[in-house]
Amino acid sequence: MKQLMRKICSKNSLVFMFIIIAITIITNITYADSALQANYQVSLNKEDIPSEWAKEEIYKAKQLYLIPEKIQGEYGKNITREEFSEAVIKLYEALKAEKYTLETESPFIDTQNPEVIKANRLGIVKGVGEGKFAPDEAITRQDISVMMYRTLKAAKPGYDYSIISNHVFGDQNIISPWAREAVAYLYGIEVINGVGGNMFNPLDNTSREEAIVLIKRMYDKAIASGNSIIVSREGTSRRELAMKMKLEELIAQEMGKPYQWGGTGPKGYDCSGLVYSIYGKLGIALPRTASAQSKVGTYVPKESLAYGDLVFFARDGKNVHHVGIYVGNGEFVHSPQTGDVVKKTTLLSGYYQKCYYTAKRVF
């Protein structure tokens, strides 16, 4: 009987030990799985989850196969020239509804990426000189605008590209001349925006998530359009844009030159002489005096002023005595008075706010 009891106790002890061991193993496995899951979630939150404002667009872009695999993650990281080249080829193929095949050698010595080669052959990207492409260099906002504009033109050559936005950013002079048409067009069709305070920050870099959202917007605009995408923001013609770009160059050449009564340049100017000379170089013949200049062109409300509009001032509220050229951001360029120089001044406060009289558009 005692032997039987010992056997039973021994068996119970073994069973109990097995139960303890099993519980310990299960607990450790569960803890380990929880720890791994927690670590994975931290990693995912840190690197691979886009910002709230971009989540929905990125999800949709994935569904449309608009995102190259290599930029699906680390969404806050600056996108490179090579990565964006791959992305715009995805956009091009989506808009054309066909794959773009190409068999040719790379024109660049620092990349053999076939998507970069395709983008180059389509006229979407160029090198940086000396046979190089700089594939790992972070891309700027103005570069992205140009590449997207060229992609759309390559995929949709039948669109009407003659109308673009005449919006003037506060840092318009920093946008490279070769990028201004692209920026103006994409702003006009509401694909790109400023960064706040009417600034564009053309030389800033762009994150992966920002780039993906821009591509998705371009895709949506093109798919929703008929024969052309409608410019919905402050449209103007290419001719007008070319005039404004030339005007900007001419104004820059005169900045800092002294006031000279009766002067029409090139060494000095009075207020109307500056306007008379600059617009004459644009092929626009204006009267010589400020009072006479105020009687030509088309009236523009103060809240609708655009780059190049002439702004007039009257001390007594009825007789024009001064003129300047509006250059955006509430400022105008003029030659004020004896002892002063050609410079920018605000319309938003002080003497010229009080004396503001009217404005005219002459091109």
Image (cartoon, rainbow, N blue to C red):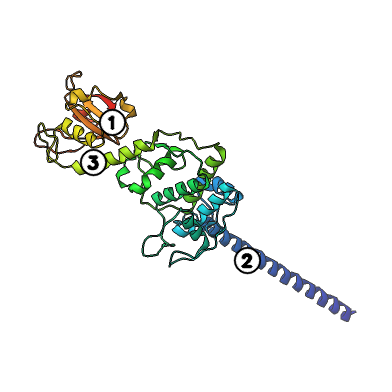
Gap between marks 3 and 1, in whole Å? 15 Å
**Label 3 vs label 1, nearer the camera:** 3
Give the mark, 2 or 3, whose residue is nearer the N terminus. Answer: 2
What is the three-letter code of the residue carrying label 3? Leu
Of the numbered discs 3 and 1, the one sitting upstream in the chain is: 3
Q: Quadrant of the C terminus?
A: top left
35 w.r.t. 76: above or below: below
**Quarter location, residue 162:** top left
**As shown in the figure, which amino acid type bears the numbered disc 1?**
Asp
Residue at screen point 34% across, 35% down = 240
Residue 309: give its label: 1
Q: Which residue type carries mark 2?
A: Ala
**Which of pointers 2 and 1 lies earlier in the amino acid sequence?**
2
- State the separation of the CA atoms marked 2 and 3: 70 Å
The residue that disc 2 covers is 32
- Using the rendered image of the protein, determine whether residue 96 is visible from the camera's viewpoint: yes
Q: Going 49% across and 49% down the picture, which residue do you hit?
A: 151
Q: Is residue 325 left or right of residue 215?
A: left
